[in-house]
Image (tube, rainbow, N blue to C red):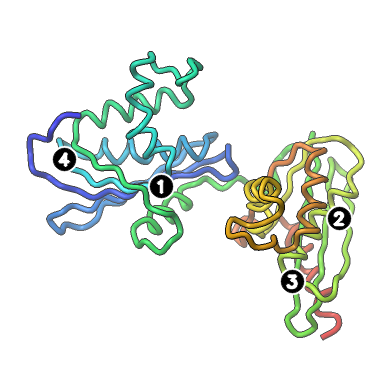
C-alpha cells in the first residue's frame, strides 16, 4: 500500500448482506471525515449474491468514493473481509489469485477490485462486533438491509412446495397456537393446533415441524416465517448446538431442545430455502395463518 500524499483522514464503517444467502443483497458504507463534515452515506444492491460478496462490495465502494489518497480507519463486522485483507490477500496474489490449496479463489474479481483500491490509501482494518450497540455499525447495517430488493412473496416457483409457518402466544392463558399452510401448484392444505403451556418461539417451531411432517413428496420447499429465531436456528445455530452436545456457547442447555431435534431431523430430508418476512411483504397465506394461530392462542383467555 502506498502512503497517502495528503493528510486527509476518514473513518469508514461498512456492512453488507443477502436475504436469503445467497439471494438479493445490499451493501452500505458510512464515511466520517476527520474535519467534522457531514457523514456521507452510500448504499446499493445486487440481485443474486452472498453475504461475503456484499461485505466486499461495501468496502470497494467506500474506497472508490474517496477522490484521492487517505489515511483510513475502516471498521467492519466481517471477519472474512478483515482477515482476507490483513492475513490472506498477499498469499493469494503470490499464488496467482488461487487459494492456499491451489483452488480457484472465491470472489476473485471482487478481491482484485478491492486490492486495487487499497493501493491508493493507508488503511487500518478493525473488526467491530455486529449488533452490539455501535452507532455507525448499526446505521450501516440498517442501510444495507434497506437496500436489499424485496422479492414479491411467495416466490413464483411451481416446482416447489410453499410452507407458511405461523405461531402466536397469549400471555394471559399461557397458551400458544400454530398454523401451517402447505401449497403446491393449485393444491392448498392448512393445519393448526394449540399447546399449553407454551411460548411464541415454541409455536413458530411447532408450525414448521407440523408442516414438514405433513409433506410426503421429496420436493424443494420454501418456508415463510416472521420469526428470525426459527430461521437463524435452523440455518446457523442448530449445527453448532449438535456439535456442542446440545449446549450453547456458554455451556447452558439449549432452549426447546426437543423441538429443535425434531426440526433438524425433518430438514435432513429436504432442500429448504428460508424466507423471513415482515409486515411489508407478508404473503396473504401467512397473514391468514397468523390470524388463525392468534385466535387459537386467545381461546382460553
Q: Quote the CA–CA distance across marks 1 and 3.
A: 33 Å
The residue indicated by pointer 4 is: 70
Give x and y (percent) for residue 182.
84, 50
Please report whichever mark, 1 or 3, sits nearer to the chain's N-terminal start. Answer: 1
Give x and y (percent) for residue 102.
48, 15
Q: Quadrant of residue 124?
A: top left
Check if mark 2's residue and mark 4's residue have beta carbons within 8 Å.
Answer: no
Comparing marks 3 and 2, which lies closer to the viewer?
A: 3
The residue indicated by pointer 2 is: 210
The number of discs equals: 4
The residue indicated by pointer 1 is: 15
Q: Residues within 10 Å of mark 4 (few under 14, many from 20)?
A: many
Quarter of the figure with the N terminus: top left
Res 226 label? none
Q: SS for tag 4?
A: loop
Please report whichever mark, 4 or 3, sits nearer to the chain's N-terminal start. Answer: 4
Give x and y (percent) for residue 150.
56, 48
Please report whichever mark, 2 or 4, sits nearer to the chain's N-terminal start. Answer: 4
Q: Residue at x 79, y 40 (%)?
A: 268
Check if mark 1's residue and mark 3's residue have beta carbons within 8 Å.
Answer: no
Q: Quote the CA–CA distance across marks 2 and 4.
A: 56 Å
Which is more toward the observer, 70 or 191? Answer: 70
Please report whichever mark, 1 or 4, sits nearer to the chain's N-terminal start. Answer: 1
Q: Residue at x 72, y 69 (%)?
A: 200
Q: Residues within 10 Å of mark 2 (few under 14, many from 20)?
A: many
Q: SS for tag 1?
A: strand
Res 199 label? 3
Amino acid at each position: 500500500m502506498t502512503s497517502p500524499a495528503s493528510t486527509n483522514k476518514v473513518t469508514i464503517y461498512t456492512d453488507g448482506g443477502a436475504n436469503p444467502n445467497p439471494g438479493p443483497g445490499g451493501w452500505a458504507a458510512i464515511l466520517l471525515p476527520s474535519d467534522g463534515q457531514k457523514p456521507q452515506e452510500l448504499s446499493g444492491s445486487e440481485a443474486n449474491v452472498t453475504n461475503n460478496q456484499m461485505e466486499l462490495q461495501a468496502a470497494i465502494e467506500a474506497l472508490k468514493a474517496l477522490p484521492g489518497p487517505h489515511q483510513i480507519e475502516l471498521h467492519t463486522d466481517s471477519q472474512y473481509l478483515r482477515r482476507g485483507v490483513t492475513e490472506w490477500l498477499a498469499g493469494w496474489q503470490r499464488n496467482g489469485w488461487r487459494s492456499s490449496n491451489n483452488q480457484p479463489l472465491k470472489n476473485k474479481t471482487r478481491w482484485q477490485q478491492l486490492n486495487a483500491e487499497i493501493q491508493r490509501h493507508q488503511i487500518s482494518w478493525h473488526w467491530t462486533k455486529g449488533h452490539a450497540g455501535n452507532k455507525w455499525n448499526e446505521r450501516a447495517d440498517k442501510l444495507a438491509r434497506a437496500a436489499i430488493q424485496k422479492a414479491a412473496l411467495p416466490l413464483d416457483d411451481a416446482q416447489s412446495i410453499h410452507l407458511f409457518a405461523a405461531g402466536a402466544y397469549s400471555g394471559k392463558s399461557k397458551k400458544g397456537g400454530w398454523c401451517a399452510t402447505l401449497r403446491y401448484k393449485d393444491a392448498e392444505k392448512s393445519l393448526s393446533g394449540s399447546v399449553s403451556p407454551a411460548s411464541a418461539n415454541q409455536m413458530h417451531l411447532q408450525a414448521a415441524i407440523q408442516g414438514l411432517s405433513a409433506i410426503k413428496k421429496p420436493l424443494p420447499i420454501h418456508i415463510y416465517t416472521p420469526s428470525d429465531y426459527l430461521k437463524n436456528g435452523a440455518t446457523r445455530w442448530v449445527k453448532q448446538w449438535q456439535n456442542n452436545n446440545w449446549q450453547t456457547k456458554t455451556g447452558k442447555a439449549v432452549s426447546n431442545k426437543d423441538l429443535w431435534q425434531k426440526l433438524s431431523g425433518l430438514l435432513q430430508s429436504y432442500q429448504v430455502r428460508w424466507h423471513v418476512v415482515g409486515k411489508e411483504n407478508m404473503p396473504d397465506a401467512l397473514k391468514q395463518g397468523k390470524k388463525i394461530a392468534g385466535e387459537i392462542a386467545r381461546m382460553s383467555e
